[in-house]
Structures are given as C-alpha cells and as structure tokens.
Amino acid sequence: MTIKLVATDMDGTFLNDDKHFDKERFQRVYDYMNQNDIRFVSASGNQYYQLKSFFSDFPKTLFVAENGALIGSHEKIYQTDSLDKNIVKKTIDVIESLPDVNAVMCGKKSAYILNSSSPEFYRISNFYFPEIQSVDRFEDVDDDVLKFSLGCPDDETEFYMDKLATMIGSGVSIVTSGHGDIDVIRADVNKATGLEYLSQKFNIKPEEMCAFGDGGNDLEMLDYVGHGVAMKNATPIVHKTANFETVDNNQQGVIQHLEELFNL
C-alpha cells in the first residue's frame, strides 16, 4: 500500500487532552513524509489561524480548516466555501431564540463573538479562534461566513443538534465533535470535500490517503480515504466507519500508527 497523504483531526485525535503533541517524536515522522513526498494535513473544525500556530515548526503542513470550509497552506488560502447569506440570517435568528446556546460566527477574515457572551465562553473561544472580534450583533459583520460554532450543555448535544436541523432546515449540516460542541456548516462541505480538493490539486487518489479521527465530524473523511484510522477513544460510529484502530490521543496514537505504517 502506498500512502501519499496523511490527514488528521486535532482535538481528541492528534492532540492530547492538554492540547499538545510530542513535537520531537512527530519531527521524525514529518521528516520521513517530506523525504518521501507524503503530504501532511491538519483537518479540523477549528480555525485556520489556530491550526497554523500548532504547526509553526512544520512549514509544509496543509490545512483543511473549519470542517472543510477553508483549505490552505501556511502561505496562502486555496479555497473557501461560505454559507449563503439567507442561511446566515436564518441561523442567526435561530441561535438568538435558543438562550442555552452560545455562538461564534466563523468568517474568512476572523471569527466573531457577541459582546453579551460570558467571559468564560470568550476565554474558551479565544483558544480555538485566535483571530476573533467582539461585536454587538452578528448581522453587522462584513465577512464571508464559513460556519457557526455553537456551545450547548454537554448532555443536551443531540437534542440541540436535532432542534437546529429542524429550525434551520436544508442547506446546512449539523455536526459535532462531542462535549457540547456543534458546528453549522454548508450541507455540501465537510472534511472529505476538503481532501477531494487536495486530491485534485496534488493528483493523489483517495485510496492513497490515510486519515485519523475520533468524532462525528470525521466520518466522511474516514469513509473517503483508503486507510481510515479510529482513535481508541473514538465514538462507536467512528469505530464502525474506520478500517483500523490506534491507541488513544493521550498516547499519541496518530504518531504511533504512522511510525508503524512507515516502519520508523
């Protein structure tokens, strides 16, 4: 089997629970991939600018950010897929009607959070969206909106996913990485469509790709590639979707599997 591209989710997958990874250990894998013309992709629901900061020492990393809505490298953004303006307006209206749901509106230039948000939600959001602006109203923002990132009570994630899907309707997908985090994205956009773009750009077939994930927003990506790997800590549906399994994120399961795959 020839692997020409490796893509990994970040939270709960490449990163441990403290949001770090073993840089020295990964450097060996990264050097091997560069020497053998294997592309490395950070594929996440998180912001492009945050992902770049994680891999500042690994300049050839590619990015499928915002759950596939933004694709780029360290140097440039290749492509963005924004939400229709009518869907943006409808989503804002729905969010405002749900008092237990906190929201970040994710644009191409920046993320946006309401001034009325709690300090704790702002602190958490600022980690995931280092480029973020506080605004009085989402309606006043002039930017291409890539997705909405929502927070709700952990034990009500499924309830709010169903409610959002019903209230917003067609044109969006409602996905989660777990832990009360919900993303509202374009219905035709996901991590797999991001990899499809890279497949065409670099002439790499899906069966020549390897991907790692742990949550519901990784399913399309794991199904798209030839070598899909579930983390030990992944949800049951991820284990059903992936062909392979590795140890959990706190044991650096992505790096361990790549070491085994490349005989390092």
Image: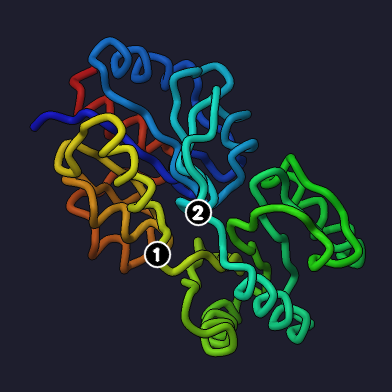
> Residue 133 placed where, x, y %?
83, 49
Kindly indicate whether the residue at mark 1 contacts the one at mark 2 (C-beta within 8 angstroms).
yes
Residue drawn where x is 22% and y is 47% of the image: 225
In the picture, measured across the screen, residue 229 lies left or right of residue 99, that is left
Classify residue 109 by image quadrant: top right
- For mark 1, give the secondary structure: loop
Residue drawn where x is 52% and y is 83% of the image: 165
What quarter of the picture does the N terminus occupy? top left
**Which amino acid type corresponds to the residue marked 2 in the rendered image?**
Asp
- Classify 162 as above or below 221: below
Task: Name the foreground residue: 148 vs 216.
Answer: 148
Q: Earlier in the sequence, mark 2 or mark 1?
A: 2
- Classify 148 as above or below 243: below
Q: Is residue 250 visible?
A: no
> Residue 140 placed where, x, y %?
84, 63
Q: Which mark is residue 188?
A: 1
Mark 2, other Cα within 10 Å: few <14 / some 14–19 / many ≥20: many
Task: Name the foreground residue: 213 vs 225.
Answer: 225
- For mark 2, give the secondary structure: loop
**Which amino acid type corresponds to the residue marked 1 in the rendered image?**
Asp
Task: Name the foreground residue: 195 vs 41.
Answer: 195
Instruction: Give the residue number, with chain letter if any, for mark 2.
Output: 81
What quarter of the picture does the C terminus occupy? top left
- Classify 181 as above or below 214: below
Residue drawn where x is 34% and y is 43% of the image: 197
